[in-house]
Image (cartoon, coloured by chain):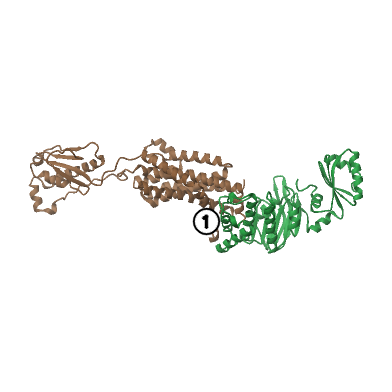
Chain colours: A green, B brown
């Protein structure tokens, strides 16, 4: 349904997308994980048609996405901004935004009412949106992108800064969209969200996909090793130096920052060796956790930094 | 342009208009506040009264011959009521006294003086109308005397009624002379309308362009089949509708409460429509350029007041020195007000306001091109 080939976009000297390629099929829900500055929003903006001056091709339903404006009728986009009219009611917002697409008026009204039910805003459909909480606005923002039954739905961090109830509601919408055959690309910082919502996960950084697959496929990248997470009062440099001579011997330093480091170990028996090296260098350890490999570990391994970076 | 595209543009423009009109302060700024200006300037430039429809003339005919009565008959006119009196009455508006030797002097072909008096406080314009009629009558009688020579004119006319009134003396003002003095409201309503179109369209139109851009609303529109050019056209149309709607409201209020007369209403609306288009383009330009709401409001107030004062919205530019009138040409308001004055005060038609329409249209095109280039979806 969607084929992205060698999409490249620069902002001056900064390469935001670097020959980015991706395929997406009908009903697939792809979670696009990446730290800030990875290029997620740039990708969504290019697909949405609000960014120019890039190279590469995007084919949607067999046609050039950027050459055929009518294709926009099949595309639903939920931006990171709460981009709607605060002065209007939720219902009026839906009718306005839906009116930009080729949806018959009666069908649009029916669809707007149905979506308001689904995002649990039906009871406040006629209130001005400016009276809504952040979570309610975020749900409305999402509903607007779904009004015209798109075949491809792009969501740019749709769960940022909202309460649990709103988050659950939005993730439900995404799952339902996928189940009804809509292909979805959804960018986020939240590992748990993609773990529970997406049929496929792609990890991107520096404008490229570093790895993609199902959760199980990605976890296998780290292998059958335990993850040791060490917290303490140390700087990244001395920590790396302390483990320099034992790294590679069944111990892999996944990431290290001041006060926090992650290592993959072939066996937990190697942990005393690690602690010994740290104590000799007088590096204070305040906490140590042993975890099974998960998506976060994969992310750390691939990007060398956590999603918080 | 396809039907669907036009429909989408209208959809966005209509929504913009709805949001701007829906603002709780909208009616204060676009109706209540301008009405205050209208009343203030309307009363300030209140004209003296216009001449009454029928002017009254009291004639004291002391003539001992036949010519006095003949002359009074000649004075009669549909817009003149003649009262006769035997002596000068205590109360009158205008008084004509025909002396006892009126006929004798005519027959002797001697000149004579007639006393025409106006009560202080009586309409000057009605007096002027009566005076004009008197001159016409005198001219007719003299012409008849010349035509029929020395003979007995009265007898001649009795036998030949078809020759009566054979001389017609007409008086009229030179073309484009102000014959009916407009009310102060006929100036203040168009003036205030033009001023507030500038102010409100730039403020509301500019601020909403800025807000839409900052909130990502403009960018979201591009997710739909709308192009940037479509969004720009929709913004232009929305702001034009705002200006035109405001003008319509003030004109309706002006007609109902202040007896507004614009001369030719369709042509006046055409002038206002083209002017509103120029202001719509200016508002999109300013909204695209400014990054803060305060900047737009400050700029709008400054430009609107400067253009209004210079352009003749506050006082008729016909009364300012020629040098100031020349400078006023830099104000878009000047071209609109000048056209509206031509229509109302100088009985102008389409041909008379064509240069004004041309300038305003050219200005609209230039501003639209500049605004189109400055228009941006995101900061």
Q: Which residue is mark 1?
A: B10
Q: Residue at x 80, y 47 (%)?
A: A304
B275 sits to left or right of B89: right
Image position, residue B31 (x, y; %): 44, 46
Q: Is A158 or A247 nearer to us in this picture?
A: A158
A198 sits to left or right of B179: right
Image quadrant assignment for residue A194: bottom right
**Whether residue B68 can be seen here:** yes
Image position, residue A33 (x, y; %): 74, 52
**Whether residue B226 can be seen here:** no
Q: Is B242 or B347 nearer to us in this picture?
A: B242
**Vertical side of A216 occupied by B109: above or below:** above
The extreme front residue here reads: A123
B355 sits to left or right of B208: left
**How many callouts does the rendering have?**
1
Image position, residue A264 (x, y; %): 86, 50
Q: Chain of mark 1?
A: B
Q: Residues within 10 Å of mark 1 (few under 14, many from 20)?
A: some
Give the secondary structure at mark 1: helix
Instruction: State the quadrant of the N terminus of chain A.
Output: bottom right
Q: Is A134 or A223 nearer to us in this picture?
A: A134
B183 sits to left or right of A253: left
Instruction: State the quadrant of the C terminus of chain A.
Output: top right
Q: Is A181 or B286 nearer to us in this picture?
A: A181
Image position, residue B356 (x, y; %): 42, 46
């Amino acid at each position: 349904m969607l084929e992205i080939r060698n999409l490249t976009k620069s902002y001056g000297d900064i390469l935001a997308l670097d020959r980015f390629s991706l395929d997406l099929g009908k009903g697939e829900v792809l979670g696009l994980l990446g730290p800030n500055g990875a290029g997620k929003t740039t990708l969504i903006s290019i697909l949405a048609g609000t960014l120019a001056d890039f190279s590469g091709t995007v084919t949607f339903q067999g046609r050039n996405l950027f050459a055929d404006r009518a294709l926009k009728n099949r595309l639903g986009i939920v931006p990171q901004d709460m981009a709607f009219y605060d002065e209007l009611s939720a219902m009026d917002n839906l009718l306005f935004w839906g009116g930009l697409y080729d949806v018959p008026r009666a069908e649009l009204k029916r669809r707007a009412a149905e979506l308001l039910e689904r995002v649990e805003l039906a009871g406040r459909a006629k209130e001005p949106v400016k009276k809504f909480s952040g979570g309610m606005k975020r749900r409305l923002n999402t509903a607007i992108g779904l009004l015209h039954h798109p075949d491809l739905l792009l969501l740019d961090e749709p769960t940022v800064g909202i309460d649990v109830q709103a988050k659950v509601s939005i993730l439900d919408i995404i799952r339902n969209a996928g189940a009804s055959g809509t292909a979805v690309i959804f960018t986020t910082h939240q590992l748990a969200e993609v773990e529970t919502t997406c049929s496929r996960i792609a990890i991107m950084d520096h404008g490229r996909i570093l790895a993609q697959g199902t959760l199980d496929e990605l976890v296998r990248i780290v292998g059958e090793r335990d993850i040791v997470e060490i917290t303490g009062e140390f700087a990244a440099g001395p920590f790396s130096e302390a483990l320099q001579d034992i790294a590679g011997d069944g111990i892999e330093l996944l990431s290290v920052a001041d006060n926090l480091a992650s290592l993959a170990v072939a066996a937990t028996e190697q942990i005393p060796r690690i602690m010994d090296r740290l104590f000799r260098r007088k590096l204070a350890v305040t906490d140590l956790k042993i975890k099974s490999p998960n998506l976060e570990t994969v992310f750390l391994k691939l990007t060398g930094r956590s999603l918080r970076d | 342009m396809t039907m669907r595209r036009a429909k989408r543009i209208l959809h966005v423009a209509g929504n913009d208009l709805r949001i701007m009109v829906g603002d709780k302060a909208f009616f204060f700024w676009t109706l209540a506040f301008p009405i205050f200006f209208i009343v203030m300037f309307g009363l300030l430039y209140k004209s003296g009264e216009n001449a009454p429809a029928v002017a009254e003339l009291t004639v004291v005919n002391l003539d001992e011959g036949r010519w006095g009565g003949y002359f009074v008959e000649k004075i009669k006119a549909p817009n003149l009521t003649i009262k006769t009196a035997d002596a000068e009455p205590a109360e009158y508006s205008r008084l004509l006294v025909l002396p006892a030797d009126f006929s004798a002097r005519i027959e002797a072909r001697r000149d004579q003086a007639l006393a025409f008096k106006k009560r202080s406080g009586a309409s000057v314009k009605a007096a002027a109308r009566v005076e004009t009629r008197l001159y016409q009558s005198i001219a007719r009688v003299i012409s008849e005397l010349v035509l029929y020579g020395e003979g007995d004119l009265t007898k001649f006319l009795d036998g030949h009624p078809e020759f009566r009134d054979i001389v017609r003396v007409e008086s009229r003002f030179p073309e484009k002379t102000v014959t009916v003095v407009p009310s102060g409201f006929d100036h203040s309503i168009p003036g205030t309308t033009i001023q507030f179109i500038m102010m409100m369209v730039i403020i509301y139109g500019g601020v909403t362009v800025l807000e839409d851009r900052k909130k990502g609303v403009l960018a979201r529109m591009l997710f739909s089949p709308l192009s940037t050019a479509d969004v720009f056209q929709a913004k232009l149309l929305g702001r034009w509708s705002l200006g035109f709607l405001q003008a319509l409201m003030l004109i309706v209020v002006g007609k109902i409460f202040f007896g507004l007369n614009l001369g030719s209403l369709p042509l006046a609306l055409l002038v206002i429509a083209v002017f509103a288009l120029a202001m719509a383009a200016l508002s999109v330009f300013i909204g695209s350029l400014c990054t803060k709401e305060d900047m737009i409001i400050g700029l709008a107030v400054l430009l609107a007041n400067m253009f209004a004062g210079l352009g003749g919205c506050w006082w008729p530019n016909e009364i300012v020195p020629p040098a100031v009138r020349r400078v006023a040409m830099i104000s878009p308001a000047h071209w609109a007000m000048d056209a509206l004055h031509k229509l109302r005060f100088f009985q102008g038609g389409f041909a008379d306001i064509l240069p004004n329409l041309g300038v305003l249209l050219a200005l609209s095109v230039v501003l639209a091109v500049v605004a189109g280039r400055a228009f941006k979806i995101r900061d």
